[in-house]
Image (cartoon, rainbow, N blue to C red):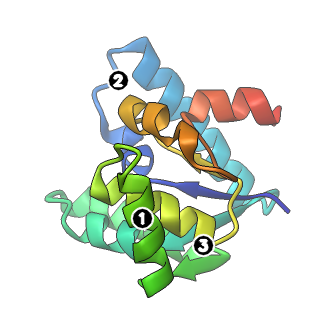
């Protein structure tokens, strides 16, 4: 079964201003992906980085909505030396430290896909072997779900 990793900005996309067509389409694609997870057509990976970023979300309602997904995850990656070392390598590709840790956690949890709404993350993550980093729309298009 396909295992995917959604980063924090992807989880929070429905809370963004929906006036932009791109934001609305990414929101719809993200909700569609979550429905596939609910239906057990694909597995969700979770990580300590998602917990960390969600804990620091200043909006209680958003924090609560995102945290529910932790219970649906097939795997939950904790901090380890391997994750941190791999993230340091990815940071060398120009990724922000938190993005590098998300990517490392996705690899650690045997994901083929990391889904984000961060264009800079997508662009800089192209050098990561074994992980496709895409936005929700591209994921739905490429996987054909």
Give the x, y percent position of residue 145: 81, 37
Tell me whether circle 2 and circle 3 mark residues in contact (CB < 8 Å): no
* Disc 1 element: helix
Question: Residue drawn at (54%, 33%), measured in percent from left and top?
Answer: 135
Query: Around disc 2, counting alpha carbons within 10 Å, would you say few (fewer than 14), some (14 to 19), or many (20 or more)?
Result: some
Q: Is residue 66 visible?
A: no
Image mark for residue 18: 2
Give the x, y percent position of residue 128: 57, 49
Question: Residue drawn at (68%, 50%), measured in percent from left and top?
Answer: 35
Give the x, y percent position of residue 131: 65, 50
Query: Around disc 1, counting alpha carbons within 10 Å, would you say few (fewer than 14), some (14 to 19), or many (20 or more)?
Result: many
Q: Return the disc, 2 or 1, that comes first in the chain's sequence.
A: 2
Q: Is residue 59 left or right of residue 111?
A: left
Give the x, y percent position of residue 90: 44, 55
Q: Return the disc, 2 or 3, that comes first in the chain's sequence.
A: 2
Q: Is residue 72 left or right of residue 27?
A: right
Q: Is residue 123 above or below residue 127?
A: above
* Disc 2 element: loop
- Distance between the alpha carbons at the discs numbered 3 and 1: 11 Å
Q: Is residue 29 above or below residue 64?
A: above
Please identify the quarter of the rendering in which residue 58 is found.
bottom left
Viewer-nearest of labels 2 and 3? 3
Q: Could you tell me which quadrant the N terminus lies in?
A: bottom right
Question: Residue drawn at (34%, 43%), measured in percent from left and top?
Answer: 94
Would you name the residue on which mark 1 appears?
87
Would you name the residue on which mark 3 appears?
108
Please identify the quarter of the rendering in which residue 5 is found.
bottom right
Tell me whether circle 3 and circle 1 mark residues in contact (CB < 8 Å): no
* Disc 3 element: helix
């Amino acid at each position: 079964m396909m295992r995917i990793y959604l980063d924090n900005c992807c989880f929070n996309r429905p809370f963004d201003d929906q006036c932009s067509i791109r934001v609305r389409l990414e929101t719809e694609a993200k909700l569609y992906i979550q429905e596939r997870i609910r239906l057990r057509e694909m597995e969700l990976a979770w990580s300590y980085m998602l917990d960390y970023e969600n804990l620091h979300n200043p909006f209680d309602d958003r924090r609560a909505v995102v945290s529910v997904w932790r219970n649906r995850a097939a795997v939950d990656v904790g901090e380890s030396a391997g994750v941190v070392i791999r993230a340091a390598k990815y940071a060398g590709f120009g990724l922000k430290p938190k993005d590098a840790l998300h990517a490392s956690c996705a690899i650690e949890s045997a994901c083929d896909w990391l889904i984000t709404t961060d264009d800079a993350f997508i662009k800089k993550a192209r050098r990561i072997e074994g992980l496709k980093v895409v936005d929700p729309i591209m994921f739905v298009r490429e996987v054909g779900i």
